[in-house]
Image (cartoon, rainbow, N blue to C red):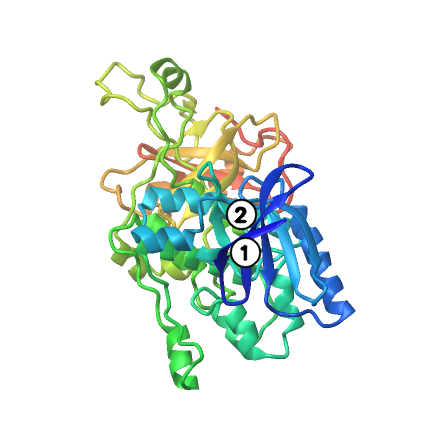
């Protein structure tokens, strides 16, 4: 039973409706455009069914049904989100705090990664298509309706208009096929708007002339004033105008934002139990230094730090000369005993983190050497640390080979640095597959 309109956009209207058999309120989105032929109708229903398979994700709007009305207009029956959209939120209060942007961004990037892994593109991510339910959870909506754009692909105006020029990737204006990179750009643009109250690029549409359109699409995106440098790095990489240099996956964008989420202090007993196992935030550079170093145009790769437990500053104690697990041995730096990690996340070569795991289980990276972090390197990037003589010697291929256990081969293994506030670990991993057990001596 269809009720009153809840909202109206350029191409459709959302109605409040009652699902009588289940006695619940739902939302029905009815598109204004008509799917003329059976082929277009089947394409829409196929994508709507695919979108419904994403419904179990906590940050995707649940789809309950879809169809085509007698007059050819497609509709989707979906979860009722009473909190409006992120577009409504920005219109009401303007920009939101960076912690909220990070929280929302990590959740939405996770939802997008789930969709991409299922072979589904969204094609129209924007603040108006991200809804908030009655519990405050953000939900990515309108996957199925993206198919309607395909049915009108003979009209450039309709196609680009349907994809919201202010949030569409620049390559869309060249009428390229939809890609995952386009979705990543649109999510980056949405988060940028959430953090600033404005779009990253103001694209005139319809464009008065080709020159003004090209100039708008090539305009650099300004870093967000006052935002954490690592957040700027994550968003500006997602907003790179060249899809080949853009953040390569929604999983990576999710991991970068996850690394910026605020960790609430644990109760004292739990904090004591986990001390030394948490993540430590690496030092960060000012935004101008990141720009000067060229990090905003680079793809971001993975790494992991270790965070000191919450509480008062540590008091000097009679700690042993070497950290636990470090052993003096031949060669540069120290040997380390059974330190293995999963995937590593490197945010702009500044904030690097990795999750420690048991070397006897599944892991990707192993530490083969360690050195105390040189004094005066608090703001240094991993690249700069790797150029220091003591770090370069410890993390060299020669030192890795010397630390390899008899009967094992680490020839051709890739190497990475894992800095923390106090140390730099030298990690290694095979180019393909996962190593079995520890490949390096701990003494």
Quarter of the image where one finds residue 259: top left
- The answer for how far apart the CA atoms under marks 1 and 2 are is 31 Å
Residue to which mark 1 is pinned: 14
The x and y percentages for residue 115 are 61, 50
* SS at circle 2: helix
Is 364 displayed left or right of 150 in the figure? left
Residue 8 in the image, given as x and y percentages of width and height: 49, 61
Rendered image quadrant of residue 46: bottom right
Say left or right for 8 vs 349: right
Kindly identify which numbered label has been placed on residue 251. 2
Residue in the foreground of this view, choosing between 429 and 196: 196
- Is residue 16 placed above or below 262 in the rendered structure? below
Front-lying residue, 123 or 27: 27
Q: Residue at x 45, y 79 (%)?
A: 206
Q: Is residue 399 left or right of residue 198?
A: right
Depth check: 426 or 278 in front? 278
Decide which of tag 1 and tag 2 comes sooner along the chain: 1
Q: Secondary structure at mark 1?
A: strand
From what the image shows, is residue 21 above or below residue 297? above
Residue at 33% x, 27% y: name it.
308
Give residue 291's quadrant in the image: bottom left
x and y percentages locating residue 281 in the rendered image: 34, 37
161 or 258: nearer the eye?
Answer: 161
> Residue at left 26%, top 41%?
378
Q: Can I make out residue 235 in this image?
A: yes
Is residue 154 depicted above or below 225 in this figure?
A: below
| Labels 1, 2: front one | 1
Residue 395 visible to the viewer: no
């Amino acid at each position: 039973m269809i009720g009153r309109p809840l909202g109206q956009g350029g191409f459709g209207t959302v109605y409040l409706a009652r699902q009588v058999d289940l006695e619940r309120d739902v939302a029905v989105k009815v598109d204004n455009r008509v799917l003329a032929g059976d082929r277009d109708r089947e394409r829409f229903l196929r994508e709507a069914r695919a979108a419904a398979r994403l419904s179990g994700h906590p940050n995707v709007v649940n789809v309950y049904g879809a169809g085509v009305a007698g007059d050819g207009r497609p509709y989707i029956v979906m979860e009722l989100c009473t909190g409006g959209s992120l577009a409504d939120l920005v219109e009401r209060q303007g920009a939101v705090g960076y912690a909220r942007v990070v929280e929302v961004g990590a959740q939405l990037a996770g939802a997008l990664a789930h969709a991409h892994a299922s072979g589904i593109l969204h094609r129209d991510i924007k603040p108006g298509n991200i809804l908030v339910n009655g519990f405050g959870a953000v939900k990515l909506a309108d996957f199925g309706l993206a198919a309607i754009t395909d049915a009108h692909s003979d009209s450039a105006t309709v196609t680009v208009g349907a994809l919201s020029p202010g949030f569409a990737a620049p390559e869309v204006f060249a009428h390229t096929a939809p890609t995952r990179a386009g979705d990543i750009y649109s999510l980056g643009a949405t988060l940028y708007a959430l953090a600033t109250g404005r779009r990253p690029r103001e694209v005139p549409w319809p464009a008065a002339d080709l020159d003004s359109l090209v100039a708008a699409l090539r305009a650099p995106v300004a870093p967000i004033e006052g935002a954490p440098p690592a957040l700027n790095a994550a968003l500006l990489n997602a907003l790179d105008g060249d899809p080949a240099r853009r953040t390569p996956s929604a999983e990576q964008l999710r991991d970068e934002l996850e690394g910026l989420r605020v960790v609430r202090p644990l109760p004292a007993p739990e904090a004591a139990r986990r001390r030394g196992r948490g993540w430590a935030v690496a030092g960060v550079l000012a935004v101008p230094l990141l720009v000067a170093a060229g990090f905003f145009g680079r793809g971001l790769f993975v790494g992991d730090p270790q965070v000191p437990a919450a509480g008062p500053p540590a008091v000097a104690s009679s700690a042993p000369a070497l950290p636990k697990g470090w052993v003096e041995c031949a060669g540069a730096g120290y040997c380390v005993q059974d330190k293995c990690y999963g995937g590593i996340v490197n945010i702009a070569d500044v904030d690097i983190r990795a999750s420690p795991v048991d070397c006897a289980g599944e892991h990707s990276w192993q530490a083969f050497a360690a050195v105390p972090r040189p004094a005066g390197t608090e703001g240094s990037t991993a690249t700069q640390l790797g150029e220091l003589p003591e770090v370069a010697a410890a993390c060299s291929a020669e030192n890795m080979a010397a630390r390899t256990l008899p009967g094992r081969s680490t020839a051709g293994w890739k190497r990475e640095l894992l800095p923390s506030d106090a140390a730099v670990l030298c990690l290694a991993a095979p180019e393909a597959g996962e190593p079995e057990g520890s490949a390096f001596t701990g003494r």
